[in-house]
Each structure stands twice: as C-alpha cells, then as structure tokens.
Amino acid sequence: MNNYHTHSYRCRHASGDIADYVEAARAAGIGELGFSEHVPYADGRWPDSRMDLGELPGYLAAVRAAAEAESRRPEGEGRMSILLGLESEWSAEDDAYLREELVGRLGVGYLVSGTHYYRRGGAWEDAGALRRAADLSAYAAHLARSLESGLFAYVAHPDLYCMSYLRWDEDARACARDVLDAARAARIPVEINGYGMRKARVRAPEGERAPYPHEGFWELAASYGLDVVVNSDAHRPVDVAAGLAEGRALAARLGLRVLDSPFER
Ligand SMILES: [Zn+2]
Ligand SMILES: [Zn+2]
C-alpha cells in the first residue's frame, strides 16, 4: 500500500510535520510515501492554503532528510521509500517556475496536478465554489491545458467540482468527459481522493453524498479504461492511509484498474 498525496502543517490547513507522517505511514504499513505539499508562489497568492515561498527550502530539506533517514534503516524493519513532490495549479505564466525552478533547479521529484482554481478570462476562480454549468467548461478547459504541459504525474481529485456543483446532469457529465479525455491524452492516471471522503457530506438532489469521489464520475472513468491511483490526501498524520481501502473498493466495484504507483507504467 502506497500513498503519493501528503501535506504538512506548512500549508496552513493541515497539521503535523514530515516526520510525523512518516511514522504514521510506517504504523499503517505503507511502503512508499510521497509528499505533495501545495506549491508556494513568489506573489504570495492563496496564502490560506500554502506555505510562503521562504518556507520552501525547509520543506524540501525535511522531506530529503526523511528519505535519507529511511534509506539508512535496515531492510525489513518497515523501511519505506520517501518521494519529494509538490501539488500544483498550472498556468502559462507559472510554467517556467514549475518546470525550470521547482523540477529543474530544485530537483522536486514529481508534481501533482491539483486544480483548486481555474482561469476564466484573466481571473482565477475557485473550483471548489463552482456552481454554474457555464463555469464547468472553463474548469475543464483549464485542467486540460494544465495536463498538456506534461508536467504532472497524476491528476488529483479530478471530480473536485462535484463538491459545489451538486447536480449530476448532462453538464456535469460533459465536464467529466472533458477531464477524462485530457487525462487520457496526457497518459497519466486519475486519482480517487480520500480527503473528499472525510469532508462534510453535501446535499445533492439525488441525496446526501461525499463531495468527492463522485460515483457517477468514476463510472464514466471506468468506461474510459483509464488507470487510477488511490491516495489519502492526508492533512493530518492520523489520516495518512485514510480512504485507501475505500478507494480501492470503489475502483474494484466499478472495474477500474488501480496502479500501486503512478510511476509504475
Ligand atoms: Zn490541502
Ligand atoms: Zn492535496
């Protein structure tokens, strides 16, 4: 069992430091643990959900130190491999920063596409507050452009829009198809996300449900034959393996193929 979506106190809406997640992961029997803290930006945007740029070196050093400490552990004593990643939005203006600075110069091992915001016109809009059908196509188009960058290892919570767009109607399905088409074109797996299972349930016309993963979205994903990764999206050490079994059960029920690692293909 592995997990490639892990945060820390640095993003200001999570608790625990790198070592706390490592110990919780060892106790949970995780074999490979990937850290994916939210990317900080030089302009300080979205300060409630990410570290300052000045905290980035400390994050990189903490994950690298944990990876180094693991590699010195005797094999068979719960030794894990630890990966250094970041979860990121994408825009054309940020592409060089992500590609050349974070991946290139700083050696970040992988980037996760986490589209919490999308561009409409010149402005960023909150994907978690998307309510109008007209906004779904902008969200999907932005996500598709993000994946075309070729920067990302997998698509985190591709069904995040189901948190606030509550109907599973033709517009919601069209959005799902656009997102799934983009993932297929980029040849990367889509993530069944455990964090959505732990969030407050929402009242949809069809009844109360988790904000995501959305069953209808994953039924469509199964018809695409896309590969899936299941991650906890842990924001507390105790949740480092939360939702992994449930996500795999969902995938099995719908006939989705689960990869043990997004890097295995
Ligand atoms: Zn987060
Ligand atoms: Zn996340």
Image (cartoon, rainbow, N blue to C red):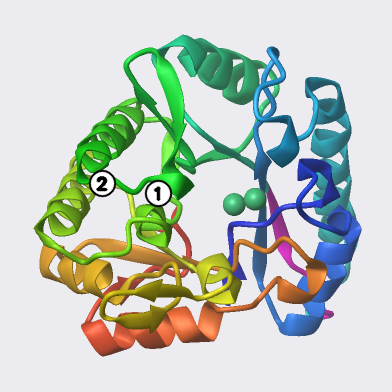
Decide: marks 1, 2 in contact (CB < 8 A)?
yes
Residue stretch rendered in magenta on the structure? 77-83
State whether residue 238 appears in this view.
Answer: yes
Query: Is disc 1's CB within 8 Å of ligand 2?
Result: no
Residue 161 in magenta stretch: no
How busy is the neighbourhood of tag 1: few (under 14 within 10 Å), some, or many (20 plus)?
Answer: many
Front residue of 118 and 53 = 118
* Of 49 and 74, the residue lying toward us: 49
Position above or below: 81 against 101: below
Taking the image as shown, residue 183 lies to the left or right of residue 212, namely: left
| Residue on which the image places disc 1 | 155
Q: Amino acid at mark 2?
A: Ala
Q: Amino acid at mark 1?
A: Val
Q: How many numbered marks have been drawn onto this rendered protein structure?
A: 2
Which of the 4 image quarters holds residue 232? bottom right
Q: Nearer the viewer, residue 120 or 104?
A: 120
User: Could you tell me residue 208's position as x and y percent?
Assistant: 40, 82
Looking at the image, is mark 1 or mark 2 earlier in the sequence? 1
Q: Secondary structure at mark 2?
A: helix
Q: Is residue 81 magenta?
A: yes
Label disc, if present, on residue 95 of the rendered structure: none
Query: Does 27 appear above or below 118?
Result: below
Label 2: which residue?
A: 183
